[in-house]
Amino acid sequence: MQKLKERWGVTSNFQLTIIFIVFAITGSSSVFVAKPFLNLIGLQQGNFPDAWWGTTIYWILRILLIFPFYQILLVIYGWLFGQFKFFWAFEKKMLTRLGLGFLF
């Protein structure tokens, strides 16, 4: 745990615990939000009852939607838990590594 605290620049175990909680909540929430969003735009898993490609398209879109929802929710939950500075820096670093640094 000490190496992780040093790597992330975290000073206390409490702060590290909050960061882990934010990561857990964000992951679960982003998966949860993707399904109603697809329903909102009219794409449901049952729209293609016997077509394997319809189910495949549904799941590919759902997985692709999870990524942007995760990015947005990570910063929001980080702010709600008082760790905005950490998660904003984390977000910028992660998106830069993915080649999306031009967004900042």
Image: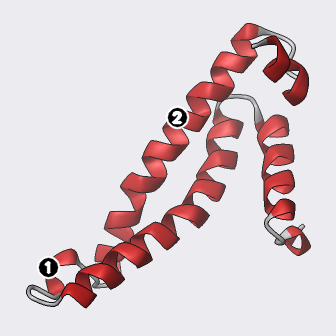
Q: Which residue is mark 1?
A: 46
Q: Is residue 43 above or below residue 77?
A: below
Which mark, residue 86? none
SS assignment at label 2 = helix
| Residue at position x 25%, y 87% in the image | 54
Residue 23 point in image, percent of width and height = 59, 36
Precedes in sequence: disc 2 or disc 1: 2
Q: Residue at x 41, y 58 (%)?
A: 33
* Quadrant, the C terminus: bottom right
Q: Secondary structure at mark 1?
A: helix
Which quarter of the figure has residue 52?
A: bottom left
Residue 74 as seen in the image, left or right of residue 88: left
10 Å crowding of disc 2: few (<14), some (14-19), many (20+): few
In the image, what residue occupies the spot 50% across and 63% down? 66
What is the crowding at mark 1: few (fewer than 14 residues within 10 Å), some, or many (at least 20)? Answer: few
Q: Quadrant of the N terminus?
A: top right
Q: Position of residue 42 (x, y in %)?
A: 28, 85
Task: Determine contact: label 2, label 1, CB under 8 Å.
Answer: no
**Looking at the image, is 63 positioned above or below residue 19?**
below
Q: Tell me, what colour scheme is on the image?
A: secondary structure
Residue 71: name its quadrant.
Answer: bottom right
Seen in the image, is 104 located left or right of residue 65?
A: right
Find residue 88 and report its horizontal and vertical position in percent: 81, 47
Q: Residue at x 35, y 75 (%)?
A: 38
Q: Nearer the viewer, residue 6 or 19?
A: 6
- Residue occupied by mark 2: 24
Residue type pointed to by label 2: Ala
Give the amino acid type for the residue marked by disc 1 in the picture. Answer: Gly
